[in-house]
Amino acid sequence: MGQTVLEVLGSLVTRELADAILARALARAGRTALPENPRRVRELAEGALHDAVIEIAGVDIADSFVRDLAPILDVISSGVQTKPDSDRPRSVLPPSRSSSFPPRREGAPLRILVVTADSLEDLRRSVGAFADVARASDAFELITAIETRQGPVLVVVDGYRPVVELSVLAAFLPRVPDGCRVALWGFDAAERRAIEGTPGYSVVDAGPSWGALADALTRL
């Protein structure tokens, strides 16, 4: 998300001005870098960053910045998708090597965060002691869970019972943080085009049942 803000700003002013605007906005906000949490990005974009654009580049540029960024922020805030359960064709993307994911200690449960509209009771019963399973019901919960995680975590994004569009997910996570892995489950090839080229993502090739997912996870 932070990268998206920079791209919008960079389309309106030179790199030198963009750097100056960003430095002033971050200093006023008491930050050293753009946040990844979408709520914090919105607060910064509509507050200190907007003010810094006015001061350095003028009101017209600031208005254009807000106008160009607003649709992206709106999509992120409302990027919820509802689809019926169904089997969908899947093809496996190559495993991501762009983020560090330390190997699980022998005997330690795998930490799994599932982004889904469904309950996870069936998955918990299927994986047993193999994994600690938690749920994120929207993109904000996902980002918060990643930012507050303790240790490595596997994020599974449910495409059979989706709550987040992949284009929104790519905006939220333009880079998968170290210690995380993001696996897409149940999205078809057309849907995955929204995230192609974004580093840090792979695919779990499994049917729509929680048991099928559990079987696939044990092979990771």
Image (tube, helix red, strand yellow):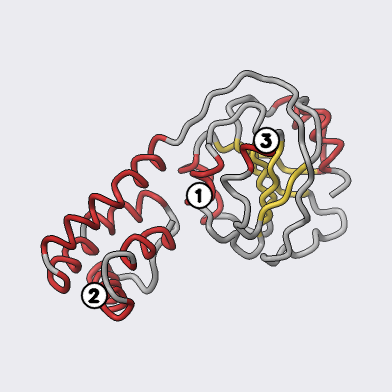
Q: Amino acid at mark 1?
A: Ile
Q: Amino acid at mark 2?
A: Arg
Q: Amino acid at mark 3?
A: Phe
10 Å crowding of disc 2: few (<14), some (14-19), many (20+)? some
Mark-to-mark CA distance, 2 and 3: 41 Å
Q: For residue 47, which quarter of the picture? A: bottom left
Query: Where residue 3 sits: x, y (%)?
Result: 44, 62
Query: Where residue 66 sits: x, y (%)?
Result: 23, 53
Q: For residue 76, which quarter of the picture? A: top left
Q: Which mark is residue 143?
A: 1
Q: As drawn, is 195 to the left or to the right of 42?
A: right
Query: Where residue 195 sits: x, y (%)?
Result: 59, 49
Mark-to-mark CA distance, 1 and 2: 26 Å
Dot 2 or dot 3: first in sequence order is 2
Residue holding disc 2: 24
| Local secondary structure at mark 2 | helix
Q: Which mark is residue 187?
A: 3
Foreground mark, 2 or 3?
Answer: 3
Nearest the camera: 10 or 28? 10
| Local secondary structure at mark 3 | loop
